[in-house]
Image (spheres, grey):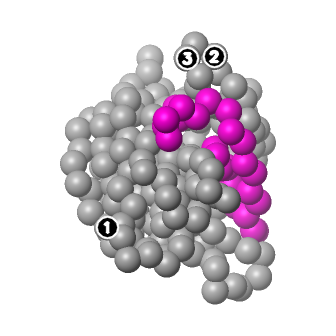
């Protein structure tokens, strides 16, 4: 039977949780916050974005969904769903998907990091600077969907994410970032959050 559970942890508290309930949240991100990784050491490598999350076992994870919106207006502004896989050496592997502001437009940006991160962009399902996103466990893989009305639009399959083992648990949550330099904070609204585990 599925269980819906609220967040219990907050990472990188360089921004405030403005308000929270069990299904609706508002996070702020300061300038120069990001989640990014290159295979070699780089000044751009960062893991300092504010996140609300719950630690669960990857074997118990079934689904996470949220609707995200904001006044996206600065290059690389972003917010959405994230999975983080802490490693024994103190590093992290991760998967994130959310709205991302690029070239003066909003996209669904998805990035996956193992030894380095890759990145893809899509414009499916975005309406009025808002999109509904879903992570789902299917046949051993993590699938990433954009939810557009009743339609689930698949945008990525990550085959390794849920097979890393349960030794250190897996963070499931929401994040926001403002990687560019700005004097203003990015305020991101999250609603309709669901996390299903067994």
Query: Is label 2 in a helix, a strand or a loop?
Result: strand
x and y percent of residue 68 in the render? 45, 40
Q: Earlier along the polypeptide chain: callout 1 or callout 3?
A: 1
Q: Is residue 59 left or right of residue 72?
A: right
Q: Residue at x 72, y 42 (%)?
A: 122
Name the main secondary structure of what is drawn in magenta. strand
Query: Is label 3 in a helix, a strand or a loop?
Result: loop
- How far apart are the alpha carbons under marks 1 and 3? 32 Å
- Work out which residue is located at the far top of the displayed protein and give it: 150
Q: Is residue 63 above or below residue 90?
A: above
Q: Residue at x 55, y 17 (%)?
A: 149
- How far apart are the alpha carbons under marks 3 and 2? 6 Å
In the picture of the structure, the residue carrying the numbered disc 1 is: 15
**In front: 177, or 55?**
177
x and y percent of residue 28 in the render? 34, 60
In the picture of the structure, the residue carrying the numbered disc 2 is: 151
Quadrant position of residue 117? bottom right
Q: Crowding near pointer 2: few (<14 within 10 Å), some, many (20+)?
A: few
Residue 149 marker: 3
Q: Is residue 119 above or below residue 99?
A: below
Q: Crowding near pointer 1: few (<14 within 10 Å), some, many (20+)?
A: some
Q: Residue at x 39, y 61 (%)?
A: 186
Residue 43 falls inside the magenta stretch:
no
x and y percent of residue 15 in the render? 31, 67
Q: Earlier along the polypeptide chain: callout 2 or callout 1?
A: 1
Q: Is residue 120 left or right of residue 34?
A: right
* Magenta part of the chain: 107-132
- How far apart are the alpha carbons under marks 2 and 1? 34 Å
Q: Residue at x 38, y 51 (%)?
A: 188
Residue 116 falls inside the magenta stretch:
yes
């Amino acid at each position: 039977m599925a269980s819906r559970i609220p967040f219990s942890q907050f990472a990188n508290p360089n921004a405030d949780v403005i308000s929270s309930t069990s299904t609706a949240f508002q996070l702020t991100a300061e300038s120069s916050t990001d989640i990014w990784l290159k295979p070699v050491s780089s000044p751009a490598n960062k893991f300092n974005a504010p996140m609300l999350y719950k630690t669960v076992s990857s074997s118990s994870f079934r689904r996470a969904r949220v609707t995200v919106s904001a006044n996206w207006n600065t290059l690389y502004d972003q917010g959405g769903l994230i999975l983080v896989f802490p490693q024994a050496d103190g590093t992290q592997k991760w998967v994130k998907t959310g709205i991302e502001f690029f070239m003066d437009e909003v996209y669904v940006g998805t990035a996956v990091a193992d030894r380095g991160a890759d990145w893809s962009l899509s414009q499916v399902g975005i309406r009025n600077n808002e999109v509904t996103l879903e992570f789902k466990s299917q046949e051993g893989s993590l699938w990433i969907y954009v939810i557009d009305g009743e339609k689930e639009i698949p945008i990525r399959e990550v085959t390794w994410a849920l097979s890393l083992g349960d030794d250190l648990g897996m963070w499931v949550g929401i994040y926001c970032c403002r990687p560019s330099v700005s004097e203003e904070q990015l305020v991101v609204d999250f609603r309709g959050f669901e996390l299903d585990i067994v």
